[in-house]
Image: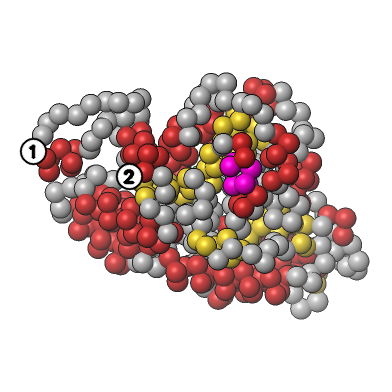
Amino acid sequence: MSTVLEGRGVLAIHGGRPVRPTLLPYGRQSIEESDIEAVVEVLRSDWLTTGPKVAEFEEAVAAWVGAKYAVSFSSGTAALHAAAFTADLQPGDEAVTTPLTFAATANCVLYQGATPVFADVQPDTLNIDPEQIASRITSQTKAILPVDYAGHPADLEPILQLADRHELVVIEDACHALGAGYRKRPVGGLAHMTVFSFHPVKHLTTGEGGMVTTDNPRFAETLRRFRNHGLSSDGRQRQAKRNWHYEMVLLGFNYRLSDIACALGIRQLSRLEANLARRRQIAARYQMEFHDVAGIRTPVVRDDVDPAWHLYPIRLELNQLSSSRNEVFQAMRAENIGVNVHYIPVHLHPYYRERFGYKGGEYPVAEAAYECLVSLPMFHGMSDDDVEDVVEVVQKILGAFAKNSRLS
Ligand SMILES: Cc1ncc(COP(=O)(O)O)c(C=O)c1O
C-alpha cells in the first residue's frame, strides 16, 4: 500500500523517494581548518600530553562557566567517575539520580561500589523531580546526580537546598548542557561539581573528552590526582621543579586528556557562543513549526532557564496517531532523517534489571515518556536546507499518520 499526500509524494517507507538522498545524523561535530592547524601545531611541539594546552583549556572552560576550577578528563564518563570518587561514594552509600539518562550517569556510582537510587522525572522537562529525590533520601544517601536532559537545566535550586539540609554532594551531569543558563547563571558554577562531555555530538568536541568544574579547591585537587594514577604531581610540574620525586596518595587512573585534544578544545571553545546561537535558532524554528502539529508534543522550556539544546526530543501523542513510535521512527529514517531515542530508562537495561530486580513500572513518568520520545536532528553545523528537510519530513509523516488523516 502506498500513502500519498497531495503534492508531497509517497512516503519513502512505502516506496516513495526520500526527502533527502543522504542521511542527516541527529548530531555531529563541526571541524574547521583552524582546528586542524591547532592540532598539527601541538603534534610538532614537545608536549603531546599534559603540557601547556591542558591548563589553557581548563582555565578557558572555568572562565566560560564562571567556576574557580576546571579539571579535564579523557571522557565525560571518566569525569563522572572522578566526581563520584571525589564525593567519597563508597560501598554502602547511595546516590540519587534520574532514570532518563545515558547509563554512564548511574554507572559512575557503581564504579565506586555504591548504589544508584532512581527518582522519577517531572512530566514537563523530563528532569529529575526534587520531590521524588526527597522521598528517596535515606541515612545512606551521600550524593545527588541531576542530569540536564537535552540541555535544559534541572531544577537546581530545590536540589541544592535538599543537599544542604542533608549534607549531600550535588554532581550535576551537564554533559548535555555546556552553555546553558539557570536563573541567569551559567551551568558549571552552580552545583558542587558539574560534569561536561566533549564527545563529537556535543556543543564542542575534543574527539573524546570531559571536564569537571567546581569552586571547591579540595575537590579540584582530588579530581586532578584521581585522573593521574593518584599521584601528587604531574610530569610537567616535576620537570619545572627539576625534581623526580612523586608520591601516589590515592588509587587513581590514567584519565588524562592529551594536549592534542585540548588544543582542539581551545579552538572549539572560541566558537561555543556561535554554536549555541545556531542551536537556539534551530530550536526556535522547530518550536514554531511543530507546536500545532497534531500528534506531537514539543520540548517544554521553563521561564527561568536558557537551554543549550543538545537534543531536540519530541514526544509523540500516540493516542492521536494511527501508528506506533517505531513506525514513525522507521518512516523518518526512510526519509533519511537520522532520528534517535534518548533514552531507554537506565533501570530497564538488562544489567540493572538483573542486578537490582527492576521489572518496569517503578518510574512511571520516565517510562511513559520513553515510549513516545523521538530526538530530531539538532547540531550547530545543520544548514538551513537540513532544517527545512526535517520540518518537511515531520509534517509529511505526522500528517500521514494522524488519526483524522483520510490517508492514515
Ligand atoms: C547524560 C550523559 N552523561 C554522560 C555521558 C558520557 O559522556 P562521554 O561519552 O563523554 O563519556 C553522556 C554521553 O553522551 C551523556 O549523554
Type of amino acid under label 1: Arg
Q: Quadrant of residue 131?
A: top right
Residue 25 visible? The answer is no
Q: Is residue 211 left or right of residue 90?
A: left
Q: Is residue 172 left or right of residue 15?
A: left
Give residue 145's position: percent from left, percent from top.
Answer: 58, 41
| Main secondary structure found in the magenta portion | helix
Residue that label 2 marks: 257
- For the C terminus, give its image quadrant: bottom right
Is 139 situated above or below 125?
Answer: above
Is 133 situated above or below 391?
Answer: above
The residue under the point 56% across, 32% down is 142
Type of amino acid under label 2: Leu
Describe the element under mark 2 as helix, strand or loop.
loop
Give residue 262's position: percent from left, percent from top.
Answer: 31, 53
Give residue 18's position: percent from left, percent from top.
Answer: 65, 65
Q: Quadrant of residue 120?
A: top right
| Within-10-Å neighbours for mark 2: few <14, some 14–19, many 20+ | many
Is 398 situated above or below 160?
Answer: below
Say whether residue 332 is magenta.
no
Residue 315 visible? The answer is yes
167 and 35: which is toward the camera: 167
- For the N terminus, give its image quadrant: bottom right
Q: Is residue 198 left or right of residue 347?
A: left
Residue that label 1 marks: 242
Q: Which residues are magenta?
A: 159-164
297 and 404: which is toward the camera: 297
